C-alpha cells in the first residue's frame, strides 16, 4: 500500500517545488510535480515595461545564469528591430555569457554533490564560483545579476587590468577542475550513487524535449552555440561535449567538461577581442512584428518569443525556459526508483526553480 | 534491623486491630545493612567518581565538546574554510556550549497526532542507552585483576553488543511515535541497516574472541600485551570499523538520517533539548565505538611510558577522528548498496578472518590462549 509523500517546499533539498511521491517502502512508484509556488509573472511584467527596463527583470528569471538569460532576451529584441551589434560587443557578450555558464555549472556541481551529503565538493565549487563572481563584478559592477548585456551592445567596456585578472582566474580554474575530477568523478561512492541512476535514453530525451547538457549526456550531439551560432560563437573554436550513457554521472561529466570548454572560449575571446565601439544606437520603439530567437544557456536551450506592437513595450513575451523543459525529464525518471535517488536525479538534471516558476 | 533513623509509628485507632509496621522485602533489608558499613562509603565515593567524572558525566561532556569542535574544525580544513572561530577563548572552542544554550532556549514541540509518551521517551532512552554502554568498558587496570569500570563482567563484550543492537528499536519507536512519513521511512531504514551491519559486526568480534579466548574486554586487552590484534586480524579490523560506522550512523553510512532524502530520519520532529540529547548520544556513540575499536584491535591501554589511560585516550581520539573524517571525503551510500556491501563483501571477509583466527590458534598454535 503506497503512501503519498509531499516531497517539497519544507524539505531541505527540494527548493520551491513539491514532488508528490507515491512511496511503497523505499521505492517511489510514481511522481507528480507541482510547480508555481513562487510564480512571479515575469512574462506579464514585460508588457508593462519599456523594453530596456525589462533586462534586469529577466535576469531574475534565473539568477544563477543571469547573463545568458539577458542575452536571450536582448537578442530577441535586436532581431525584432533588425539591428546588428558591433563586433567588439559580440565578443564581450560571449565573455559575459560564458562566465555566467561556468558559474551556473559550478553551482550545479555543488548541488549535485550536496545530494549525497558530500559537503566538501559543495564548498569547493562554491568557493571557486566566487572567483567568477569577482570577475563578473569587475566587468559589470554586480556579482549575480549583472545587466551587462543590453539592447544594442554591452553596457561598459572591459575595465583596466581585467584581462590579466581573467587570465589568472581561468588558468587557476583550468588546473583546479582536475581536483574536482579526482575528488568527485573518481570517487567510488559518488560513482556508485550516480552511475546507472536516472538513465535517459536518446529517444526519450528527444521525445521529452530535454535540452542542454542533459540532452548531450544522452548522446544527442546538439548545441545551439555550434548548430545555430549567434554572437561570436562561429568565430571561436570549441567542442560540443557529448556522453552516451545518459545517467546522472554522464550529466555531471558533461557539465564538468563544459567548464573546460567555456574557459577555452573565454581565453580565445579575450585574445581575439577586436577594437571598435561597444554599442550601437537602438530605435526607441519596438517595431510591429514577431520573432523567436534561441540561445544556449547554462541549463539548456532558452527560447524567447516576442511580439512588438509599435510602442516601446512588447505586446507579448514568452520565455521557453530550459529548467521547465527538463522538469518533464524529472517526472519521467522518478518512477520505480529508490527514495534516495530522487535528489540525485533532481540535481543531476540541474533544475532551478527560479526559471520553472518564472 | 537497626536503622539510623527511627520510623514513625502508626497510631492505634480504637476499635481496630493494631497495624503492623511494614517490613522491607529481602533485597532491601540487606541493602540497608550494607549502607551502614564503612565499605559502603568507599564504594559510594568510587562509584560517584566513576559516574560523575570518568567515564561518566564530566568526561562525556568534555569529549562531546572537543569532538564537535574537532569535527567542525576538521571539516572546515578539508573544505578550505576556517570553521568555528568566535565563541570561546581560542578558535571557537566553546561552540558546543553556545549551541547547547541556544537549544535550551528553544521550545520543545510535540506533533499533534504523535504518541506523546513514546515520542518524549525516545530521546531520553537513546541517550541513556549510550551512557549505559560506557559502564561495561574497562578503561585501565587499578590493580592485579581489577579494572576501572563501573560494572565488571566476564561477558562485557556480549553485553555491549546487546546494548548496541537495541538502538534501531528505539529509532523505530521514535519514528512510529512521531506519526510522520519521513520518520517512518527513517525507522524502516534503521531496521534495514541493522540487517546489513549486525552480522559482520558479530563475526569480526568473533575472531578477536577466538584469539583472546574470552568475552571479557579486560582479558582481551591483557592478551594483547605482546601483539595488537590488528596484526592477525587486519581484515576483521576493517570489517569491524565499517560496520561500527554503520552502527553509529557516521556520514558515508548515515542512511537512517539522510538529510537530503528523508529530512532527518526518525528524529525529524524533535526540537530543542530533545534534539540536543539525540546529537549528544551520537557523539557518545562515537566515543564508545572508538574505545571498543582500540580495546579490541589496538591493544587498549598497552603502550610504553605513559599512564594506561593516556594511551587509551590517545588511541580513542585518533580513531574518533577517523570515524568523523568520512563525512567530508565520501558521499552517502544508498540503503541497497549498504545491504549489498554488508552481505556480499563484509560477511565473506569476516568469515575469512574467523578462519584465519581458528588456524592461528588451533592448527598452527602460534597464539596461545
Image (spheres, coloured by chain):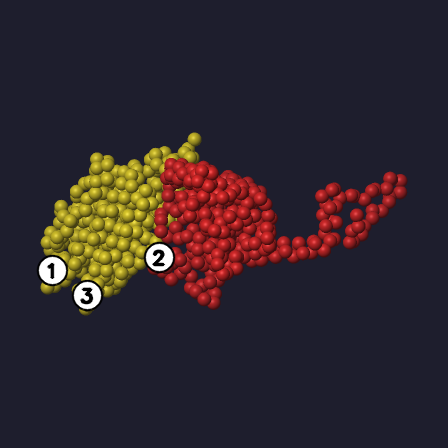
Chain colours: A yellow, B red
Residue B233 appears in which quarter of the rendering?
top left
- At which x and y percent is residue A195? 29, 41
Residue at mark 1 to residue at mark 3: CA–CA distance: 15 Å
Residue A208 appears in which quarter of the rendering?
top left
Whether residue B289 is visible, yes or no, is no
The residue that label 3 is drawn on is A164
Does label 1 or label 3 sit earlier along the sequence?
Answer: 3
**Residue B1's disc number:** none
Depth order, front residue of B209/A339:
B209
Q: Nearer the viewer, mark 1 or mark 3?
A: 3
Q: What residue appears at the point 20 percent right and 51 percent down from the top-left corner?
A: A72
Q: Nearer the viewer, mark 1 or mark 2?
A: 2
Residue at mark 2 to residue at mark 3: CA–CA distance: 28 Å
The reply to whether discs 2 and 3 touch (Cβ–Cβ < 8 Å) is no
Chain hosting mark 2: B
Left or right: B20 with respect to B223? right
- At which x and y percent is residue B97? 50, 60
Chain hosting mark 3: A
The residue that label 2 is drawn on is B79
- At which x and y percent is residue B147? 58, 52
Depth order, front residue of B299/A312:
B299
The reply to whether discs 1 and 2 touch (Cβ–Cβ < 8 Å) is no
Q: Is residue B69 above or below residue A213?
A: below
Q: Are marks 1 and 2 on the same chain?
A: no
The residue that label 1 is drawn on is A272
Residue at mark 1 to residue at mark 2: CA–CA distance: 37 Å
Q: Which element type, helix, strand or loop, lies under badge 1?
A: helix
10 Å crowding of disc 3: few (<14), some (14-19), many (20+): few
- At which x and y percent is residue A128? 28, 58
Depth order, front residue of A3/B138:
B138
Left or right: A344 with respect to A97? right
Depth order, front residue of A290/B158:
B158
Amino acid at each position: 500500500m503506497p503512501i503519498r509523500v509531499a516531497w517539497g517546499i519544507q524539505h531541505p533539498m527540494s527548493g520551491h517545488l513539491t514532488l508528490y511521491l507515491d512511496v511503497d517502502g523505499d521505492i517511489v512508484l510514481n511522481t507528480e510535480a507541482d510547480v508555481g509556488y513562487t510564480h512571479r509573472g515575469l512574462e506579464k511584467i514585460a508588457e508593462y515595461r519599456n523594453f530596456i527596463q525589462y533586462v534586469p527583470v529577466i535576469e531574475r528569471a534565473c539568477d544563477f545564469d543571469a547573463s545568458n538569460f539577458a542575452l536571450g532576451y536582448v537578442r530577441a529584441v535586436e532581431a525584432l528591430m533588425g539591428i546588428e551589434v558591433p563586433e567588439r560587443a559580440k565578443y564581450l557578450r560571449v565573455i559575459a555569457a560564458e562566465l555566467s555558464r561556468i558559474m551556473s555549472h559550478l553551482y550545479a556541481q555543488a548541488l549535485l554533490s550536496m545530494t549525497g551529503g558530500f559537503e566538501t565538493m559543495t564548498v569547493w565549487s562554491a568557493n571557486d564560483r566566487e572567483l567568477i563572481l569577482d570577475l563578473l563584478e569587475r566587468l559589470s559592477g554586480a556579482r549575480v545579476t549583472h545587466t551587462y548585456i543590453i539592447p544594442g551592445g554591452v553596457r561598459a567596456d572591459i575595465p583596466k587590468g581585467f584581462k590579466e585578472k581573467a587570465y589568472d582566474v581561468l588558468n587557476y580554474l583550468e588546473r583546479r577542475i582536475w581536483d574536482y575530477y579526482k575528488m568527485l568523478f573518481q570517487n567510488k561512492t559518488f560513482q556508485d550513487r550516480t552511475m546507472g541512476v536516472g538513465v535517459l535514453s536518446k529517444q526519450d530525451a528527444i521525445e521529452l524535449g530535454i535540452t542542454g547538457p542533459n540532452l548531450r549526456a544522452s548522446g544527442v550531439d546538439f548545441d545551439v552555440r555550434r548548430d545555430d551560432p549567434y554572437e561570436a560563437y562561429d568565430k571561436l573554436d570549441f567542442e560540443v561535449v557529448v556522453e552516451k550513457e545518459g545517467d546522472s554521472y554522464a550529466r555531471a561529466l558533461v557539465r564538468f567538461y563544459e567548464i573546460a570548454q567555456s574557459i577555452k572560449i573565454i581565453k580565445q575571446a579575450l585574445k581575439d577581442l577586436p577594437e571598435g565601439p561597444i554599442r550601437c544606437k537602438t530605435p526607441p520603439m519596438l517595431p510591429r512584428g514577431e520573432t523567436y530567437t534561441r540561445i544556449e544557456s547554462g541549463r539548456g536551450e532558452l527560447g524567447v518569443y516576442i511580439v512588438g506592437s509599435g510602442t516601446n513595450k512588447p505586446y507579448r513575451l514568452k520565455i521557453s525556459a530550459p529548467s521547465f523543459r527538463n522538469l518533464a525529464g524529472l517526472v519521467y525518471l522518478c518512477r520505480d526508483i529508490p527514495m534516495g535517488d530522487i535528489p540525485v536525479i533532481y540535481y543531476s538534471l540541474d533544475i532551478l526553480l527560479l526559471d520553472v516558476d518564472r | 534491623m537497626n536503622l539510623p533513623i527511627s520510623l514513625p509509628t502508626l497510631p492505634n485507632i480504637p476499635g481496630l486491630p493494631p497495624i503492623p509496621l511494614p517490613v522491607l522485602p529481602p533485597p532491601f533489608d540487606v541493602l540497608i545493612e550494607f549502607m551502614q558499613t564503612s565499605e559502603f562509603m568507599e564504594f559510594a565515593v568510587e562509584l560517584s567518581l566513576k559516574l560523575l567524572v570518568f567515564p561518566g558525566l564530566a568526561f562525556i561532556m568534555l569529549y562531546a565538546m572537543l569532538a564537535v569542535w574537532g569535527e567542525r574544525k576538521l571539516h572546515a580544513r578539508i573544505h578550505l574554510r576556517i570553521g568555528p572561530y568566535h565563541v570561546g577563548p581560542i578558535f571557537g572552542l566553546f561552540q558546543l556550549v553556545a549551541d547547547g544554550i541556544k537549544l535550551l532556549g528553544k521550545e520543545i514541540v510535540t506533533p499533534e497526532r504523535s504518541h506523546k509518551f513514546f515520542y518524549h521517551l525516545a530521546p531520553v532512552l537513546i541517550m541513556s542507552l549510550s551512557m549505559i554502554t560506557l559502564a561495561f568498558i574497562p578503561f585501565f587496570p587499578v590493580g592485579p585483576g581489577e579494572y576501572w569500570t563501573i560494572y565488571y563482567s566476564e561477558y562485557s563484550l556480549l553485553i555491549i553488543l546487546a546494548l548496541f543492537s537495541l538502538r534501531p528499536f528505539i529509532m523505530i519507536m521514535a519514528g512510529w511515535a512521531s506519526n510522520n512519513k519521513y520518520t517512518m521511512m527513517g525507522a524502516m531504514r534503521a531496521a534495514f541497516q541493522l540487517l546489513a551491519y549486525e552480522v559482520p559486526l558479530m563475526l569480526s568480534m568473533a575472531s578477536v574472541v577466538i584469539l583472546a579466548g574470552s568475552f571479557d574486554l579486560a582479558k582481551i586487552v591483557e592478551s594483547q600485551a605482546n601483539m595488537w590484534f590488528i596484526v592477525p586480524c587486519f581484515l576483521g579490523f576493517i570489517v569491524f570499523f565499517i560496520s561500527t560506522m554503520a552502527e553509529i550512523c557516521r556520514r558515508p553510512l548515515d542512511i537512517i538520517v539522510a538529510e537530503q532524502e528523508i529530512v532527518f530520519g526518525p528524529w525529524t520532529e524533535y526540537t530543542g533539548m530533545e534534539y540536543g540529547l539525540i546529537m549528544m548520544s551520537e557523539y557518545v556513540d562515537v566515543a564508545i565505538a572508538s574505545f571498543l575499536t582500540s580495546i579490541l584491535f589496538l591493544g587498549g591501554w598497552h603502550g610504553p611510558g605513559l599512564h594506561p589511560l593516556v594511551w587509551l585516550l590517545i588511541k580513542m581520539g585518533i580513531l574518533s577522528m577517523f570515524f568523523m573524517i568520512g563525512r567530508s571525503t565520501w558521499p552517502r551510500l544508498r540503503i541497497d548498496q549498504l545491504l549489498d556491501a554488508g552481505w556480499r563483501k563484509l560477511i565473506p571477509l569476516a568469515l575469512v578472518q574467523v578462519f584465519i583466527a581458528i588456524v592461528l590458534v588451533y592448527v598452527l598454535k602460534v597464539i596461545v590462549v
